[in-house]
Every structure is written in C-alpha cells, then in structure tokens.
Image (tube, grey):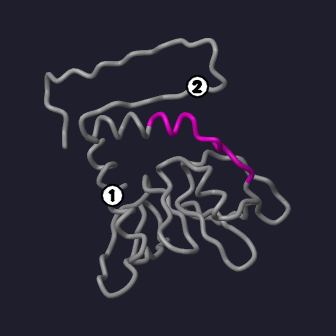
Amino acid sequence: MLRKEGETLKIRIEIVNDIDEDEVIIRCKELDSTVQDIHNAITDKTSRVTSMVFYKEKDEYYFPLVDVLFFETDSDSVYAHTTNDIFRIDYKLYELQQLLSDRFVRVSKSTIVNTVHILSISRNIASSSLIRFHKSHKQIYVSRLYYKDLKQKLNYRSLSL
C-alpha cells in the first residue's frame, strides 16, 4: 500500500529523563511503504554492527558492510563475499543474522544475502531459486523455505526506490 499524496504523517518526539534505554514506537493504521522505510532507516541506523574486520590470509580488511553481497558458511568458517573477492570473518551465521540490518536476509541454512545487491531471481518452484547480483559473476541459491521472506524484503525495497 502506498501513502497517497497529501496524506500527512505525524511525528512526535518525547524526552523522558527517567528511562533506562531509548525506545522508538511506530503507530500506524497499516504497514505501508512509508512506515516500512522508517522502520528500515531506524534499524539500519541503530544496527549493532556497522563495521567488522574481514580477513584474507594474514591481512585484515576494513570496508563498509554494504559492500558485502552475501555471507556464506562451510563447516568451519563464515565468509563474506564481495563483488570480486572472499573474506573470512569471526562470526557465526546465527550471530550475523541477529546483528545485521534488515537489508540482510537469510536465504538458506548456510547463506545470508544483502538484498541491496540482488539483480534477479530465477524462480524454480520444485527446488532452490537462483539469485544473481549486480556487477558480479557470483550466484547463490535461495531455498524454498526462505523464498517468501526474501521476496517480501525485495518488495519493500522496490517500493522505496
């Protein structure tokens, strides 16, 4: 649902001195694209992890999380994939899922994807669907179990463009 032109959105900030932590409450009639954009902006801004250390051989790398296409695990380690490279990280996949912003979505038991970089999905109803990325040869699969959540995130993303 899109907000109609001319509809107003009330914003109120209350300063309360006797609370232990800040809280943001969004009250709405329905979850439209404007409300979802506000939620995503707040989540992105308050995400507990805004940067992390990436490792390749003996070197440490520092770059924005937005550059990561996806995180993938094998039996021993978790790897961050960028457009043309792969880096090891010191997090478990389940930890990343809790720490990353809403732009990152679990797409299989072993993979979390950054929805910002998704170019297309080749849907396969019988099995996993293939995800392709902007400006990269890399591809991953989204399992049927996680497809619906990914599709919902992509729909919100396209509404906010």
Disc 1 packing (10 Å; few <14; some 14–19; many ≥20): few
Q: Nearer the viewer, residue 20 or 94?
A: 20
Give the total number of marks visible in the rendering. Answer: 2
What residue is shown with label 2? 22
Residue sitting at x 43%, y 52%? 116
Question: Which numbered marker is on residue 152?
Answer: 1
Secondary structure of the residue carrying numbered label 2:
loop
- Residues in magenta, as a range: 41-53
Q: Position of residue 77 (x, y in %)?
A: 73, 71
Report how far apart the C-alphas of labels 1 and 2 lie in the structure: 28 Å
Q: Quadrant of residue 80?
A: bottom right
Name the quarter where the C terminus is drawn.
top left
Secondary structure of the residue carrying numbered label 1:
helix
Q: Amino acid at mark 2?
A: Asp
Q: Position of residue 5 (x, y in %)?
A: 14, 27
Magenta stretch contains residue 43: yes
